[in-house]
Amino acid sequence: MAETEREYELSLGRMTKIGSELRRLCEGSATADEAASKVVRCLYEDLVDEEDGERLCTLVRLFKTHPYSRLGPELQGYTREILGEQPPFPEMKCLTLLATVGDRPEWNRREASVGHKAIPLPSEDFVGRFPMIAQLIHQFGLDTSSVIRPAPEILVDIERQRFNVFRVPDALTSPHIPAKEDFVIPFGIRSALGFGALLPSGSMFAVIMFCRFPVPEATADMFEPIALSVKLGLLPLMNESMFPG
């Protein structure tokens, strides 16, 4: 097997240390933006192969659903372009990029993102246009309707659920990851991982990692406690205040 095709593995002890570090970083942050930036940076820098120290991730991003009415003018205009002729509405959830870090300079600035600054989620059918987002929601154990229109009476039950990790074992052949020619192939993306949770407000956060190694299911399962660590760390800082941009 070629070197680049070996599977990526992490020890339980290593994952426990990373989870503790993520909690500490969030607790030392003043804003959700600051905490999100620390989370993606920690994952990008600390997730290294224990055999040779090579970094797992090519790109790490953290998103949170945010109401359209709470986005700044620039991001509102951005979502309207994606919607086309479909009009936005104030409560419409938008999957908004909070933080990003990666191998290329433009992947280290949220403002430089092309196509992912804020993804509107007006309906189940519209979400289907974004296969990776639709699959992520599905693998979290959620109905799309519970993300785009969270009902207060079921929020407590959903928020307490154990969410699964989003995993794409083979990025090159998966229909859930687009941009094969522009992203997957030229940057050697072999697999993708994601984790997140629904917050008491009804919003959802999600961390998505694009990986340079195939990630086995056993390793992906270790990210469930990481999801809990990040949720507990971000929760005091997450609110529905105006998002810049």
Image: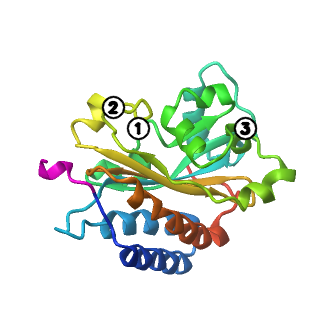
The disc labelled 2 sits on which kind of residue? Thr
Please tell me how crowded label 1 is: few (under 14), some (14-19), or many (20+) other residues with Cα within 10 Å. Answer: few
The structure residue drawn at horizontal position 72% and vertical position 62%, both measured from the top left corner, is 160
The disc labelled 1 sits on which kind of residue? Val
What residue did someone put label 3 on?
145
How far across and how far down the image is residue 146, in percent? 73, 43
Between marks 1 and 3 in the image, the one whose residue lies nearer the viewer: 3
What residue did someone put label 1 on?
114
The disc labelled 3 sits on which kind of residue? Ser
How far across and how far down the image is residue 215, in percent? 34, 53
The structure residue drawn at horizontal position 27% and vertical position 66%, both measured from the top left corner, is 48
Q: Which of marks 3 and 2 is nearer the N terminus?
A: 3
What residue did someone put label 2 on?
173
Look at the numbered disc 3 and give the secondary structure of its residue: helix
Q: Distance between the residues labelled 3 and 2?
A: 28 Å
Q: Residue 77 bears which disc, if any? A: none
